[in-house]
Image (tube, rainbow, N blue to C red):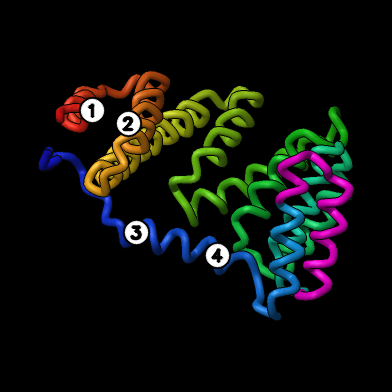
Amino acid sequence: MNLTLDIRKTPLLLLCVAALAASLQCGGSSGNASLTYFTEGKKHYARKNLEKADELFRKAGEEDPGFLNATLMRAKIRYYRKDFPGALTFLNDIISENSSHLDALFWKARVLAVGGEKTGVERNEREREAVKCLNAVIEASSGHIQARTLLALLHEKNRKYRESLYQYHAALREEESLVHTRSNLAILYARMGLKDRALKELKTAMAICDAAAIPKGGLLEIKKEIETP
């Protein structure tokens, strides 16, 4: 099994760089205490124990005021509790510290899109601000599919159909890049002898193809080669 099919290659280095960037965005490095609180908070958040998670994220932020992702998690908790003013307060605090914090900008757009007044001038102002935040996210990270999708929905809501179509099509192009990444990861797993994980990645890639109407002939060839003894 040589797995030398002619597909678009995504260097493993890029994946490492992305992981490093994500870890750096978590904030400062004041020691283990803030990270411990944050990690425990994520566990409770995953279990939907939001009150305990919020307490732990608060402690993480107190240990390290520069740990902006702890503040982001507190904003998310308030979003899911429909406390939109509280969520905006935390998100604006993050953006005041780091105006290019993409997650904070995206979540601010989500809050503005669903929270607050539903009619009148204030609603229009909130939607304009949401569009501004989403454009900032996309300008910095063109592959942010969630931002493009939300922006498309806002344009569609305001009958800006051409702009909405553009964002949807751009999101579909990014879906295609995810297919290539998944296929490369499947090949890597296969070379490491992790056949089950390789096939799982291919299954996910094929599901993306089905949803985005992307041809999957190359994926089928890779699957056949992986399954060949």
Circle 3 residue? 14
Upstream in sequence: badge 1 or badge 2: 2
x%, y% of residue 224?
18, 25
Upstream in sequence: badge 3 or badge 2: 3
Circle 4 residue? 23
Residue with the most extreme front position: 229
Residue 223 disc label: 1
Upstream in sequence: badge 4 or badge 3: 3
Label 2 residue SS: helix
Query: Is 55 placed above or below 187 here?
Result: below
Q: How far apart, in angstroms, are the residues tagged by discs 4 and 3?
A: 14 Å
Q: How far apart, in angstroms, are the residues tagged by discs 3 and 1?
A: 24 Å
Query: Is 159 placed above or below 40 here?
Result: above
The amino acid type of the residue labelled 2 equals: Leu
Residue 199 disc label: 2
Upstream in sequence: badge 3 or badge 1: 3
Magenta stretch bounds: 43-64
